[in-house]
Image (cartoon, rainbow, N blue to C red):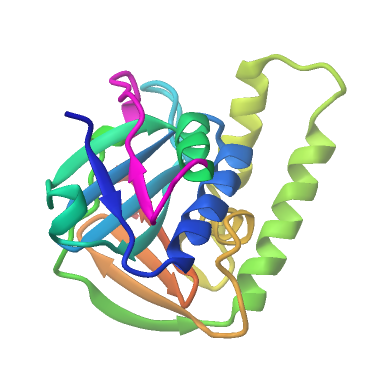
């Protein structure tokens, strides 16, 4: 039987569609959907390492949605990685706020990295402009470093160097977190709240969350 979920709020259907569309533009691949009871967590990878020697930080975007915990979709919990383009088609064709999951994929390396659900400790807040400026500077640097025709290896190396740098005035937060916040539309007028647990940092605004797994060398500094 196909697994599905039903949104409590009809506006959430459009919210997930926007999130998935932005994720497709940033990293045209897959989304990880985790349903636990009445909550659906949607994760998208913005940045992640492509090999053992790649020092690109792992940066995930997260949105959560309230879903029915019974009735039409049977309240079945799941943890599934699905193609983002297929999910967008299902969202476009959804009826009565119910969405059926597309066929899963099992070759997505970043999906095996699970941020913790609890234990987060607040570490203050930062102005959204700081992240917007860092993202704009980094995107311009990436664009300037790229010739018109370039191989995938060089693209990944440049992105790793630019987005792996720490933000000025924000220790242990890579510039890639700012790129994620801007590209996923998470920045507004509200401050960006900072939380940490273990090797993870979470940046939270009213529009969503950016999760960053710090690299081992960063923790040792």
Q: Quadrant of the N terminus?
A: top left
Magenta stretch: give its range: 93-110
- Left or right of residue 56: residue 42: left
Predominant secondary structure, magenta span: loop
Q: Specify whether residue 94 is painted magenta.
A: yes
Q: Residue at x 80, y 29 (%)?
A: 146
Q: Which residue is drawn at 17% across and 42% down?
A: 78
The answer to which quarter of the image holds residue 217 is top left
Position of residue 210 relative to residue 131, above or below, is above
Position of residue 162 relative to residue 198, above or below, is above
Q: Which residue is drawn at 36% across and 29% down?
A: 102
Q: Quadrant of the C terminus?
A: bottom left
Q: What percent of the width, then of the height, locates residue 150?
A: 76, 17
Position of residue 178 relative to residue 123, above or below, is above
The answer to whether any part of residue 220 appears in the image is no
Q: What percent of the width, then of the height, locates residue 46?
A: 50, 43
- Identify which residue, 80 or 220, lies in the foreground: 80
Q: Specify whether residue 9 is painted magenta.
A: no
């Amino acid at each position: 039987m196909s697994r599905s979920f039903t949104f409590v709020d009809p506006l959430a259907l459009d919210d997930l569609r926007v999130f998935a569309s932005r994720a497709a533009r940033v990293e045209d691949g897959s989304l990880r959907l985790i349903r636990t009871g009445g909550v659906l967590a949607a994760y998208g990878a913005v940045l992640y390492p492509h090999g053992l020697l790649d020092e690109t930080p792992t940066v995930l975007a997260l949105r959560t949605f309230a879903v029915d915990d019974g009735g039409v979709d049977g309240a079945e919990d799941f943890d599934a990685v699905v193609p983002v383009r297929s999910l967008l088609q299902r969202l476009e064709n959804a009826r009565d706020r119910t969405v059926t999951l597309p066929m899963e994929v099992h070759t997505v390396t970043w999906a095996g990295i699970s941020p913790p659900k609890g234990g987060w400790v607040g570490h203050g807040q930062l102005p959204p402009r700081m992240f917007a400026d860092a993202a704009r500077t980094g995107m311009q640097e990436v664009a300037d470093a790229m010739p018109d025709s370039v191989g995938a290896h060089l693209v990944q190396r440049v992105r790793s160097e630019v987005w792996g740098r720490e933000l000025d005035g924000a220790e242990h937060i890579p510039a890639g977190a700012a790129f994620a916040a801007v590209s996923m539309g998470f920045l507004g007028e509200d401050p960006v709240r900072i939380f940490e647990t273990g090797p993870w940092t979470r940046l939270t605004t009213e529009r969503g969350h950016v999760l960053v797994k710090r690299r081992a060398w960063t923790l040792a500094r």
